[in-house]
Image: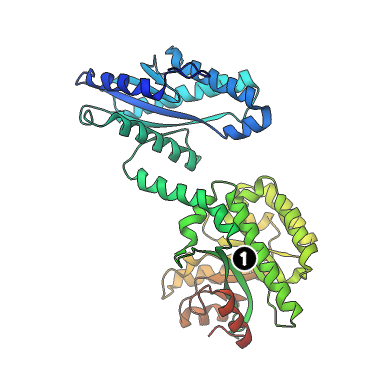
Amino acid sequence: MSDQLTGLQSYEEFVPKLKKAVSDMPEEASIAIVYSDIKHFKYFNDTYGYRRGNKLLARMSEMFSSGGEGFLGGARVVSDNIVCARFCADGDEKVFLDEIKASISYIEQILRKEFSCERIRMTAGVFFIDAKAKGINVETAISNANLARKQSKLDGNDSVTLFHPEMASKIDSELEIISTIDEAINNHELEAYYQPKIESGTGRIIGAEALVRWIKPNGTMVYPDQFIPILEKSKQIINVDYYIYNEVFSFLRGRLDKGESVVPVSMNVSRQHMKDLEIIDYVRDLCDTYKVPPQYLEFELTETMCTERTERVMEFITAFHEMGMKVSMDDFGSGYSSLKLLSQIPIDVIKLDRCFLRSRELGDREKIIITNIVHMTKELKMRSLCEGVETSDQSTFLAGIGCDEQQGYYYSKPVNIADFRQLLVSGCAR
């Protein structure tokens, strides 16, 4: 039975027709299964209503099923969001992928114009059935195209993605993170870990950086590089940041109330915050709630973020300076526009990227570069911090050239709140 909304074939009708198309496929031909979707369709429904959303789906389906020159030179079989198109195998897959991208772009343009919405964007996954893969189960082929679509949606960079075998496990793990992170936040599975910042020459702890760790109920730790890059593609990273901010503010307030020693703590800022700068009001509310003096608070922006969104970053820095907080530039030297950025953005602290200390024994060239960056920050009235310090020789060199602060495993790895309290009691990380 056809779908009442779109008029397209049901999945049950589509599968046997696809099987027949594959069995009838000439040796020199191939079939491409294109599984498409409208990105952020929930946003469209919430903004324009479900009736208009249904019309959008119906119109998209109509364009898919028309088989006209506007789409792939004529689609052969269509069901729901799935199109099966045949092409001659004389050309390579890249050529046909380019045709698919052009067709998707064409449909997007028509839909944006007809529905007066510039945010309409489509994604699609593609799986090719050629002579070598002719014996594949067609349900699996459809599933593979769908996996490629999900990957395209996760990446956010390209409208069309070709299936690769390793996608299955990668997609499963990414979707697991995306689907469980909100519950993890609600269950307090996320923890703030603190990595001390050390005063060069004295070894005193004069600050710390708050870093997130995800500890599951069974004790398994999910490290940031396993989930942060995935969540940074969506607004879910904002909830993670806000959770850690609350943890830090609460920690500092608790120590102040008990009369215990307090050092400034820096917190990382995701690029997602630069889209609307709601973070300014959120942090201002935290300040009103916890009454933490601003000199104990610092927020870290990456060099890349400063490069990509300079105007928004300027708004951010101005607002946080007005609240009395410091702003640092993290990963300095990892990009290509560092010097230009320093002339434009009023940063308080420059954090030299760990790439400068990649070699445990510093060569003359590395020493010259680090020395000049540190001297330059002093001339610009900024503080300098070098990340990735792992040896006594590195630490001694940095102190000798006047680097203000150091951070790295030579002093301490990131530790949980209990261990960090113990470090604060001693005042030193070694």
In this figure, what is the number of numbered marks? 1
Q: Residue furthest bottom?
A: 426
The residue lying toward the viewer, choosing from 103 and 42, is 42
Coloring scheme of the render?
Answer: rainbow
Percent position (x, y) of residue 201?
59, 84
Residue at image location 55% in from the left, 30% down from the top: 121
- Image quadrant containing the N terminus: top left
Determine whether, in the image, residue 108 is placed left or right of residue 296: left
Which residue is label 1 attached to?
350
Determine whether, in the image, residue 375 is placed left or right of residue 361: right
The answer to whether 35 is drawn above or below residue 412 in the figure is above
Which picture quadrant has residue 40?
A: top right
| Amino acid at circle 1 | Ile
Percent position (x, y) of residue 381?
70, 68
Residue at image location 68% in from the left, 52% down from the top: 313
The answer to whether 306 is drawn above or below residue 220 in the figure is above
The residue lying toward the viewer, choosing from 424 and 12, is 12
Q: Is residue 429 visible?
A: yes
The answer to whether 238 is drawn above or below residue 24 in the figure is below
The residue lying toward the viewer, choosing from 328 and 380, is 328
Residue at image location 43% in from the left, 68% down from the top: 358
Determine whether, in the image, residue 382 is placed left or right of residue 291: left
SS state under label 1: strand
Percent position (x, y) of residue 335?
53, 55
Percent position (x, y) of residue 175?
46, 47
Q: Residue furthest front?
A: 1
Within 10 Å of disc 1 (Cα), the crowding (few <14, some 14-19, many 20+) is many
